[in-house]
Image (cartoon, coloured by chain):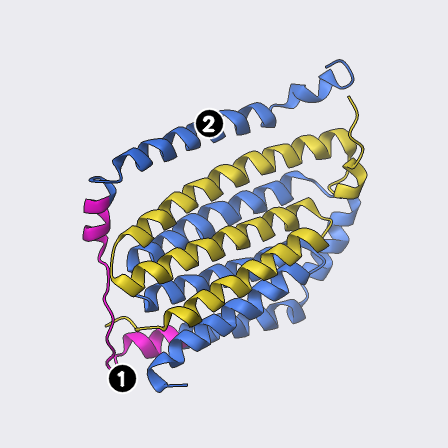
Chain colours: A yellow, B blue
């Protein structure tokens, strides 16, 4: 099956809309799990932009950057979820308004 | 809107709808289900754009590994007595309608694309072989950096996940 020659503007528009949805989720939601998930949506949108650009010129560089973003996302989610477990153990809640006190 | 772009628009619409639903659900488990569908739709977009290797990685690593990590954490949070009532909501058949519809749209789209009835279209596919040659040729330093990053994340997640950290509350 041949790939589709998607216009680069439409691919980038999809990526930016997905990024905006993820950013809205990070800013609006108060549940840490959903915030981490919205961060994943944003990283995924960046990866989509790389794939669209790579497909435009028919080069493999877009997919290589996708793989690097994938490893960054995996590292971020592992550390983020570890922090989430510690926060839940200490505060007993996963609402970020409960942990807004910065004290030593 | 030209006809050969139709599969792209379908996948893009499914991706947008499921992402919107994912960030707006109240329960994290419902949000995760919609997030999986969003990732599957993005994988279909990758496939249509001529990046089959990226599409497979998207499903294996994102939908397979990262979302499972999220689900493990939801499980470990141990919501207690609220858990039963949440499970009761969770098992309502109504909750399955929307994810099933979105998944079926993606499924029929894949069948349509793979059956070859779609119009022949031009575009360049980048095969996994070319990606591998590039990855271990000019980009080998980036691979090493990514491996260092993953090792650091492994050590960090192991340290943060240890239980005794909670005993040092107020002492550090």
Circle 1: element type: loop
Residue that label 2 marks:
B152
- Image position of A100 (left or right of B27): right
Label 2 neighbourhood size at 10 Å, few (<14), some (14-19), many (20+)?
A: some
Magenta range is: B109-134
Q: Residue at x 42, y 59 (%)?
A: A49
Q: Residue at x 37, y 50 (%)?
A: A66
Earlier-in-chain disc, 1 versus 2: 1
Query: Residue B137 or B9: which is nearer the viewer?
Result: B137
Please tell me whether residue B158 belongs to the stretch shown in magenta.
no
Query: Residue B38 or A10: which is nearer the viewer?
Result: A10
Give the letter of the chain under mark 2. B
Percent position (x, y) of residue A39?
Answer: 57, 49
The answer to which quarter of the image holds residue B27 is bottom right
Residue that label 1 marks:
B119
Label 1 neighbourhood size at 10 Å, few (<14), some (14-19), many (20+)?
A: few
Q: Residue at x 23, y 66 (%)?
A: B124
Please tell me whether residue B130 belongs to the stretch shown in magenta.
yes
Rendered view: A73 above or below B96 = above
Percent position (x, y) of residue B42?
Answer: 44, 63
Rendered view: A31 above or below B40 = above
Percent position (x, y) of residue B36?
Answer: 51, 58
Q: Quadrant of the C terminus of chain A?
A: top right
- Image position of B172 (left or right of B54): right
Rendered view: B59 above or below B117 = above
């Amino acid at each position: 099956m041949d790939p589709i020659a998607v216009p680069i503007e439409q691919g980038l528009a999809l990526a930016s809309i997905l990024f905006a949805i993820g950013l809205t989720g990070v800013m609006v939601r108060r549940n840490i799990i959903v915030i981490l998930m919205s961060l994943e949506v944003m990283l995924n949108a960046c990866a989509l932009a790389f794939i669209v650009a790579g497909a435009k010129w028919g080069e493999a560089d877009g997919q290589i950057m996708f793989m690097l973003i994938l490893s960054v996302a995996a590292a971020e989610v592992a550390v983020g979820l570890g922090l989430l477990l510690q926060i839940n153990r200490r505060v007993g809640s996963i609402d970020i308004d409960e942990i807004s006190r910065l004290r030593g | 809107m030209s006809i050969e772009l139709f599969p792209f628009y379908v996948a893009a619409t499914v991706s947008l709808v499921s992402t919107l639903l994912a960030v707006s659900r109240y329960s994290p488990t419902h949000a995760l289900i919609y997030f999986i569908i969003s990732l599957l739709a993005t994988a279909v977009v990758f496939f249509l754009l001529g990046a089959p290797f990226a599409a497979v990685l998207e499903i294996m690593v994102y939908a397979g590994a990262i979302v499972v990590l999220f689900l493990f954490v939801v499980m470990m949070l141990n919501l207690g007595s609220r858990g039963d009532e949440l499970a009761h909501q969770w098992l309502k058949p109504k909750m399955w309608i929307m994810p099933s519809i979105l998944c079926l749209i993606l499924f029929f789209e894949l069948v349509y694309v793979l059956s070859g009835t779609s119009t022949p279209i031009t575009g360049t596919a980048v095969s996994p072989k070319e990606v591998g040659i590039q990855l271990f040729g000019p980009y080998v330093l980036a691979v090493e950096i990514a491996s260092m990053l993953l090792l650091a994340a492994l050590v960090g997640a192991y340290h943060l996940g240890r239980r005794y950290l909670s005993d040092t509350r107020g002492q550090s």
